[in-house]
Amino acid sequence: MLRKLMKHELRATGRVMGPLLLLVLVAAVGGNLSTYRLLETGNGVLNTLGVLLLMGYTIAFVASGVMAFVLMVQRFYKNLLRDEGYLTMTLPVSVHEHIWAKLLTSLIWWIAVLAVAAVSMLILVFSRNMMQEISDILAHLHIGDLNLSQNLPHIVLFCVELAMLLAVGGACVCLHFYAALAVGHSFTHHKDALSVAGFFAMPVAWHFIQRIAMFLLNLVGLEGVRLWLQSLQPATQTHLTMLGVTVVTAIPAALYYALTAYFLKNRLNLG
Amino acid sequence: MNVLTCKELSKKYGRTPALSGVSLNVESGHIVGLLGPNGSGKTTLIKLANGLLTPDDGTITICGLLPGKGTHAQVSYLPERAVLPEWMSVMQILDYYADFYADFRRDAAQEMIHHLGIDMKQRIRQMSKGTREKVQLIMVMSRQAKLYLLDEPIGGVDPATRDYILNTIISNYNPEAAVVISTHLISDVEKILDDVIFLDRGCVVLESSVDEIRETRGVSVDALFREVFKC
């Protein structure tokens, strides 16, 4: 059922995000034309047109990111907790499947926004000389100095760890919104206001829990772990630090997930 | 066989009680009118049966199961409001129901849509209120469910649409299933009801068959309703 939920979720969000991401790519072509042609003509009208094309690209670029964020919140709120919730929350699927469908769809669009941002920037700076410039840069880069054969596994691993951290961080942001909305909408009155209050209260509570946890860990010898970490190779230190940060990010994400699932399953209160 | 069972079911909104110790049974093969004035707790009871609200006390079960994923596959629910996503076309809504409900009869739904002359590519936002309600009802009644929960299916529509809705209900429901129709427009639904449950201020004040009311009291359900709920 998760696959089916995601199919309909992607259909609902894709009708907004698809054209918007396409617009970013088209605007990047316009921006490239502006940078390499229109702004170099010295003609006032063409210069103005060039500036407008660059502004159009910037607006489309920012709008795609903002819209991916807005849709993440709006789909959870409107599709599960407002009128559409009467249809969605009576489907024969579990609460967990609902949460995962929303979460994975949001992450897919965030990845798509990042990918389109990278491609659009390449389009924006693309020129006939670009390939030559890149090969020049590579020619002057002393790969041997980097000891690539030795560092490549670490670089690849670091990239994987960074991707994991970004995914967990993104999930944490989504689940923070979901938990606040699920808790706020379990009340009979002032649902939206209580959701906002919950949104700000939850990180405060997490910070408080973190402080207590750190205090307890210090009591049982966190300093020893720190010293042990410092004695390791720099590359190993980096990997372990990345792993630690990911785990520390995953803990509030798991708590927000548990809160969301509990309130949707046991305290649903569609008004 | 009892399809819907409530035992001492209670629900409050803040301090205001919406249902107080409601106990009732709905048997399969019966069309039951859940009747009561506005604010009597009809919608609350139906929402509880769908798991959209959680009870403060007591239990509600459908075919012996608490409301949840298992019961959603057996209950076909028509809410009292428009809930179909406005951006969806009729075709997309058919896909949606067919994807999630194994008991959805797509052919029957398509035939009813075709009969109404609605374009499959037409979006919900392009439809009139009456047409939206008809499409929503068609989707609900195209399922072979064990329990149909219809919340105010004829509220706020013209008499011709009311007739269409009632005809759609009686010609499409699964005869082995139970149908619960919540309404305060008694005269319109009386002719299709087997049993009635009167709710007043969150309490069951009468649970009887329609024939029994006519035979023992010598009045119609509509007349009895007006007598019981006289202001």
Image (spheres, rainbow, N blue to C red):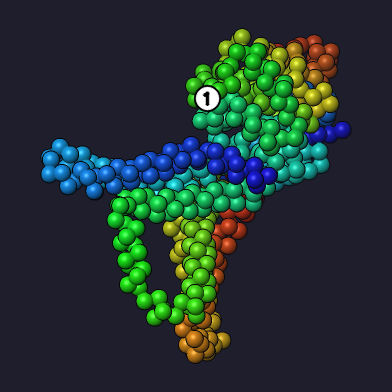
Q: Is residue A36 left or right of residue A112?
A: left
Question: Could you tell me which quadrant the C terminus of chain B lies in?
Answer: top right
Residue furthest right as drawn: B1
Which of the 4 image quadrants contains residue B101?
top right
Residue furthest top as drawn: B160
The image shows residue B222, relative to residue B176, as above or below, that is above
10 Å crowding of disc 1: few (<14), some (14-19), many (20+): some
- Image coordinates of residue A172 in percent, x first then y, are 51, 60
State the residue position of label 1: B123
Q: Is residue A223 left or right of residue A125?
A: right
Question: Could you tell me which quadrant the N terminus of chain B lies in?
Answer: top right
Residue at 49% x, 74% y: name it: A152
Is disc 1 placed on a helix, strand or loop?
Answer: loop
Residue at 49% x, 68% y: name it: A159
Residue nearer the viewer, A153 or B162: A153
Residue at 84% x, 13% y: name it: B215
- Image coordinates of residue B131 in percent, x first then y, are 57, 18
Q: Is residue B9 visible?
A: no
